[in-house]
Image (spheres, rainbow, N blue to C red):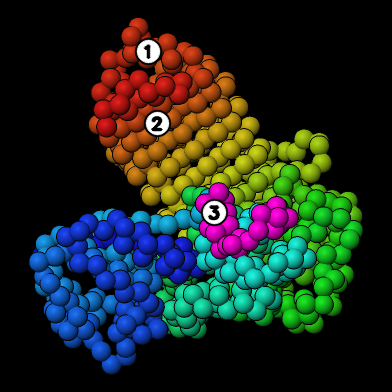
Amino acid sequence: MELGNFCDRAPASGPAAGLLILPHFFLHACPANFFWEPYFGNSKVFDLPFPFRTGCNFCRVEQTWLGSKDCSKKILLILDDVWIDIDKKWEPFYNCLKNGRCGSKILVTTRNELVARMMNSNDSIPVGQLPYEENWLLFEKIAFFKRPPNDYKNLEEIGSEIVRKCKGLPLATVTIGSLLRFKGSKEQWQHVLDSELWKLENVQKGLLTPLMLSYNDLPPMVKQCFIYCSIFLKDYEYMSKNQLIDFWMAQGYLGLEKNGENKEIIGKEYFDHLMTRSLLQENKPCSYKMHDIVHDFAQFLGNNECLSVEVHGVEDPITNSSHDKVRHLMLTVDGVGPSFPESTYRLKWLRIEKLVNLRRLQFETFDRALLYMPKRVEKLTGLRRLSEFVIPGGGDHDNKACSFEGLENLNRLEGSLTVRGLGNLTDVSDGKLTNVFKNKEKLDRLHLEFYKSEEEERLGEDDELILKTLQLPPNLENLLISRYRGNTVPSTNWMTLTKLEVLTLRACSNCKHLHHLGNLPFLELLDLTAMSSVKKVDDDFWGVESETSSSSSLCVHFPKLTHFNFWDTREWEEWDCKVEEFMPCLAILSIVRCPKLKALPDGLLQRATLKQLDFSESPILTERYNKETGEDWPKISHIPYIEIDGISVQDEQ
């Protein structure tokens, strides 16, 4: 028997509204040779499709129901709002469907993506939000049913706003439309428009039941995570998976079970639970959102303990008495003028005096708005995540600021950290900086910015001494150094960075040598940008020329490097490579805005591993390697993918 599993995954708030349409559609569209008998209901409540009561099992039901039907016709079986995602429960049910004629179909609606996957359907249709026009037609048929024309004219404008408030969710449209069907005055409709949905009794009942099914299907710990999502502003479209997991981790939601398992892995599992049940929706690549009504539902469940407010001026935004129960606050201060709202201190359940257990401190600033780190930040020894640490540039800030050495106490930091203002350091010669990063074993991404607040020129020797003194985190995987003024990178102490995979040097304007970088054993990507003092890149530039006379000539330089970028180096003229064992695994080479560079090294171009070459805004290279007229086109013609000035001239991948 051939069964075409046709899985329809409905939106987050469930497909209940679809029941108004499904029977009518199939009664008129179903072919004559199909046996049609609709069965609808909630399989989560009964653990079976609706008419099958508790105590029955799929197999016995099908033997008595399907087995008694005329098997000369095909069977069209509709199971609505299915939640059972356990294969063993479905297997006997499938076996009983063999009584149907070949070509029988099953239509399933579900809010759990795992159900659709389990059924191995090739025709899964994700159902998104209804466009406004279609939502209005649905609302119009219900709310204006048998109303006189004058009512339509008086109520149409308010009705339109109510439909927009439903945000494309048919369930909300049907529920509110049914409520308004028996309300005739404009004042009554305006009251519904102005009210919070969960304060309208009939609306609450209509929306609560299907949403509660989604919520109750979550594991206990994931329920807390779902409620906490309401800390974001309604309509917030840039919710990040990693950001959410960090927040959950800071609340301790990921550490109460599965001892010993990586908390980030647990967080991703919890996130997937919310996604597969459509309680979160993908908005753009790598960003997510929560439907307004689902957001209201999360706040309703959390008893308004989560609050997000924006401060735009001097007016205090926290004045509503309903905020008395707030325990979690996301405060967004817009610009430099607004101050911290004093009403925050009146939130008696929000503990802001003792922060010794603070785990995450993130600053989302632009154009270096953060001028220094306040004193006693070094006392926050429980911090796991710190977005940036700013070293002040003198003036009155020094008396208020935490010193750079204070960062040494925060050894539980993990993930990524940006340190700005290294150029402001004045006392770097006594070794006080040695241990700032040394014991931060969980820090794997680091950005060191040698920015100086005051305009006067600083000495490159100071920057070199800072970089030489710092012992970088031992498990570092990604390192970015910017605005460094030294003549060379004293990288001898970097040889302990055995896990470093990505290295970026940006706007290092005085740097002329990059000695010993080729000895980094696992470096995969090297990105050099705006190296304005570089004129020639050769073995001396990499610090390998003096080694060629000894047994070290057999050493492999950049043994794992696959991707090399050299951008915005406008004085660079020559590139010479005499060492044989140099970048043996190179796969991608990118040269951008190097207008004086005359040619690329033949040895690199002949690498069998090289799969992609692109260069742009480098006119000499463009002429030399032109596919039609370039004298050196034969030297690169074997490379599968070549892009010149943004145009693909060869694609044989």
> What residue range appears in magenta?
132-159
Q: Please name the residue that numbered disc 3 is placed on.
A: 137
Residues 359 and 149: in front is 149
Say what secondary structure mark 2 lies in. Answer: strand
Q: Please name the residue that numbered disc 1 is placed on.
A: 626
Is 507 above or below relative to 193? Answer: above
For the point 37% across and 34% down, the residue is 588
Q: Amino acid at mark 1?
A: Asn
For the point 67% across and 75% down, the residue is 200
Residue 211 image offset from top left, x and y in percent: 51, 74
Quadrant holding the C terminus: top left
What is the C-alpha distance between the residues marked 2 and 3?
56 Å
Left or right position of 303 against 578 = right
Q: Amino acid at mark 3?
A: Leu
Q: Mark 3: few, some, or many residues within 10 Å (few <14, many ≥20)?
A: few
Say what secondary structure mark 1 lies in. Answer: loop
Residues 60 and 311: in front is 60
Mark 2 touches mark 1? (CB < 8 Å):
no
For the point 58% across and 38% down, the residue is 506
- Residue 589 tag number: 2
Residue 189 quadrant: bottom right
Residue 413 visible here: no
Quadrant holding the N terminus: bottom left
